[in-house]
Image (tube, rainbow, N blue to C red):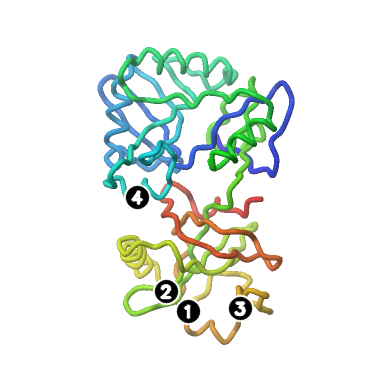
Amino acid sequence: MLATPAAALPTGPDWTYEVKWDGYRAQAVKRGASVSLLSRNLKNITRQFAGVARMVGGLDVEAAVLDGEIVALDAEGRPSFQALHHAETDGVSIVYYAFDLLHLNGRDLTREGLDTRREALRGVVGASGRSGVLLSDPLPGTPADIEAAIRHLGLEGVVAKRRHSAYAAGRQSDAWVKVRFVNHQEFVVGGYTPEGARFDSLLVGYYDGTKLICAGKVRNGFTPHARAEIADRLHALTVGRCPFANLPSTRTGRWGEGIGAGEMPSLRWVKPSLVVQVSFTEWTRDGGLRHAAFMGSRDDKRAREVRREG
């Protein structure tokens, strides 16, 4: 079940609020001693996050399907998406925040209301003892109080959910609404500026209907390891034509975001399938990114699902 992006939190007694964790969405499937972790596009990531699988295996239930987020916590206990790609860093802990329970010991809970599913989830995780699985509990206070606290802590945002909503598997629903308080989101890589055997910057964009719209270049934020890994993937995706519908730009913005016809021959194009997470200070009037920086790759997101958020 996917949340609908919004610019502000909905209000009213039917709404409840959770932290929007900055990590990898994952369903955890436990059948006896067997545990599988599946990303939101159903890629098996069990081996990649073996520690989380062991935590889920410690739950005191025979069979369950949980929905939640795999999150990297730094030495101060703060979520860090970048740290998911550098788990060997000192002080980083990889944890699993469970926020929903879809099946329990053969019982399908997806048609039950959220409050009912949460109560069942609390029983499963609360009875797990030392499993290490964490609960993503509802936040107390008014929407204004919650927003102020989340902004003060520097967390990504909030997901608002209707208390009595069923679980709409595989669909985006307005019963779940996500609001980001920081400027970063997923983008699709459609090209790059070459520099030797690697690249100087990535050209990223988002889908507007069936059209891929270029949002600008991402030059900063790459570690040497990430730059080498991305370069290898780019070379395997090379194509001959520009995939962006709005290039070349007809004008260059005040901050030089535009890509004119004169620059096009020096660029390299790739099949738009690689998704990356990018931070930026703001959107420009011309629809470009200002001061963009790479945060990490998103193998759990399909390129066609990437849209411009608020």
Label 4 to label 3: alpha-carbon separation: 33 Å
Seen from the viewer's position, the closer of residues 290 and 40 is: 290
Q: Secondary structure at mark 2?
A: strand
Instruction: Please provide percent x and percent y for residue 41.
Output: 44, 43
Instruction: Please provide percent x and percent y for residue 157.
Output: 58, 40
Tag 3 residue: 248
Seen from the viewer's position, the closer of residues 7 and 267 is: 7
Residue depth check, mark 4 versus mark 3: number of the one nearer the observer: 4
Furthest residue toward bottom: 262
* Type of amino acid at the residue the image marks with label 4: His
Residue depth check, mark 2 versus mark 1: number of the one nearer the observer: 2
Q: Residue at x 67, y 75 (%)?
A: 254
Label 1 to label 4: alpha-carbon separation: 28 Å
Residue depth check, mark 1 versus mark 4: number of the one nearer the observer: 4
Q: Secondary structure at mark 4?
A: helix
Q: Is 237 placed above or below 85 here?
A: below
Instruction: Please provide percent x and percent y for residue 282.
Output: 63, 59
Residue 200 is labelled as: 2
Tell me the crowding category of disc 2: few under 14, some 14 to 19, or many 20 or more residues within 10 angstroms, Cα based: some
Label 1 to label 3: alpha-carbon separation: 11 Å
Q: Is 230 placed above or below 167 here?
A: below
Chain-order first, disc 4 or disc 3? 4
Q: Secondary structure at mark 3?
A: loop
